[in-house]
Image (cartoon, helix red, strand yellow):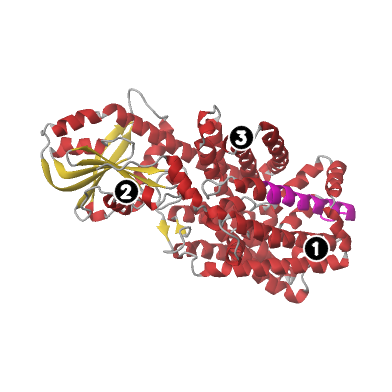
Amino acid sequence: MDSTASHAETRGATTRAASPADRPITTAGALAALGIVFGDLGTSPLYTYQTIVGTVGGHPSAADALGLLSLVVWSLIITVSIKYCVFVMRADNHGEGGILALMALVTGSEAGRAGRGVGALIVAGLFGGALLYGDGIITPAISVLSAVEGINVVTDAFKPYVLPAAMVILFALFAAQSKGTASIGRIFGPVMLLWFVVIAVLGLLGLLHRPEALLAIDPRHAIGFLMTHGLRSFIVLGGVFLALTGGEALYADMGHIGRNPIRMSWYGLVLPALLLCYAGQTALLIENPGLDGNPFFKLAPAWSVVPLVVLATCGTIIASQAIITGVFSLTRQAMQLGWFPGLNIRQTSDQEYGQIYVPIVNWTMMLCTLALTFGFGSSDALAGAYGTAVSTTMLLTTALLYNAMRDVWRWPIAIAAPISVGFLLIDLAFFGANLLKIREGGWLPLLLGCVIFTIMTTWRRGVVALRDRQTHTEQTPEWFLAKLQSGNIPRVPGTAVFLSRADAVIPPVMVRHVEQFRALHETVVSLTVQFEEYPRVSADQRAEFRHLADRLWHITVHFGFVEKPDVVAALACAKEKGCPLNLDDVVYFAAHDEVVRNETRPRLAGWQRMVFGAMYRNAVQAPDRFNLPADRFLEIGRQVAL
């Protein structure tokens, strides 16, 4: 009996019907969005205005203060409220968001596959994803530092202890990742709700003294500031952009929350609270032109500064947790899409799929974050390194969005081009402004992004070269099947499952097994694990199989790029469909190849071969990645010359 799978479009449609992006608006969903999505955006007022004011000399005039606020207001409206909430979040990949999901959506479309620029789209998606690792080490550092520094408003006595305290908090945050956040995650939403209410009230208190700050809603103040200050305003845009950092999280976390709860939280609470807070700080600057220090904490009455510092610290921890979780999810997506080596991933919750822990990524991020915090020493100094990665990612997102408009949504160029060009001009302005921060530390996240991008492309190129080498050196499936049907291969009791890294019906490891052991099990399965370019696969589409020869079956199991692959459970699905398997008597076989230099025709440059070889040797093994029983798993090794 053969089982024929539906086409990828059918599986995608099944997944899309239950798309998390279309979840209904509920109070619980909106509260979850506050805790998961808006931590970074919500805590931006801690350091944004302090940085902006510094770019204009520290004491702006009333007209300049209104111009600065107008820039912040309209940046939030255009980039977050319109670009991300209206357009980018529409481009879900069967419910999943994020730049890698967008890349897969665009390059996976019929028009995208046929287009000539598919390579450029892949580069844009990969580099944009790689840059988020740079953002992931700076966000915790600047957020926690800016919150703890608030205590300096009360007294300078604690100033020597601000940096050590911030480093202790950051160390504890990363050290706690292995325990998961399922238990404390339930309070993230209420804490952020309290945070947004508090900053809105603080903003209102400031506006009571100078309500004319509300005039900044007129975009002419922003335009006038840019025209008056000329090239200097370009530097100011680098500070204004800090108000937008975290905007990409609306799209990246869409698969966990759904676009409707995110939009409701943004329009109903987060945006009004942020605008009021920034307006209150502006009113304070107009009221006190000679104000020194962080205007955010100056908004608060003296008695409330310490509780506000505690609340701000909790908010920044939540913001940091969100970016760390986002990097973990991005790593898993890159692995499933074939752009990252297999890493050890632990599920920290049996109820929340998104609660995962990637040890090597976590500890690497921790070391980099602590080094950054110690090296820069203050949130004001760190602001110079912040923004370059996110502004580049937003720019690349716009490029991919245009292709989604044209190739996926089939919009005419007369509609897609003006919208994309408008967003692109704004993104280019922020991108150029942030490039001015290169000497101040902006090179750090870009360098880290380049390193991650190189790892991704080297891994992919090495895997392709490895598969190509195997294809040209192994015996053909027809030769092996003919030998099997002739009866020249003895059969022994038991069931064997041979895993294939390629799409080969007869995997090379099966041929090598016969060559070395001169026999084959009574029941044999050739298993192909296929990761789809959409996030989840329904249970009825999990496995397909076909009969190849006497007691020889080829099974293909499908997993979405955000799913944790469980091969044993997938084989059980094949058995339910009629494939005669005895899962209690199975031995799993996989290849263990050692990469060596090809002396005659190298397929990789020397440095790429060494990097790929190191990653290949240290990649997580099949039992861990595919949830296979280690006591019934065997590897057959050989050397492969690349």
Q: CA distance from mark 1 to mark 2?
A: 56 Å
Give how far across and how far down residue 286 sits, in percent. Answer: 87, 60
Front residue of 74/254: it is 254
Q: Which residue is mark 1?
A: 280
Q: Which residue is mark 2?
A: 622
Q: Is residue 85 above or below residue 103?
A: below
Give how far across and how far down residue 333 sits, in percent. Answer: 47, 47
Say which label, 1 or 2, has the lower sequence index: 1
Q: Is residue 570 above or below residue 194?
A: above
Tell me the magenta residue range. Answer: 57-83
* Residue 66 in which image quadrant: bottom right
Front residue of 281/370: it is 281
Say which label, 3 or 2, has the lower sequence index: 3
Name the residue at the bottom extreme: 303
**SS for callout 1:** helix
Can residue 542 be seen in this snapshot? Answer: yes
Q: Is residue 461 left or right of residue 551?
A: right
Q: Residue at x 86, y 41 (%)?
A: 227
Which amino acid type is shown beneath numbered disc 3?
Answer: Arg
Tag 3 near tag 2, CB within 8 Å: no
Say which label, 1 or 3, has the lower sequence index: 1
Q: Which residue is mark 3?
A: 406
Q: Residue at x 12, y 41 (%)?
A: 491
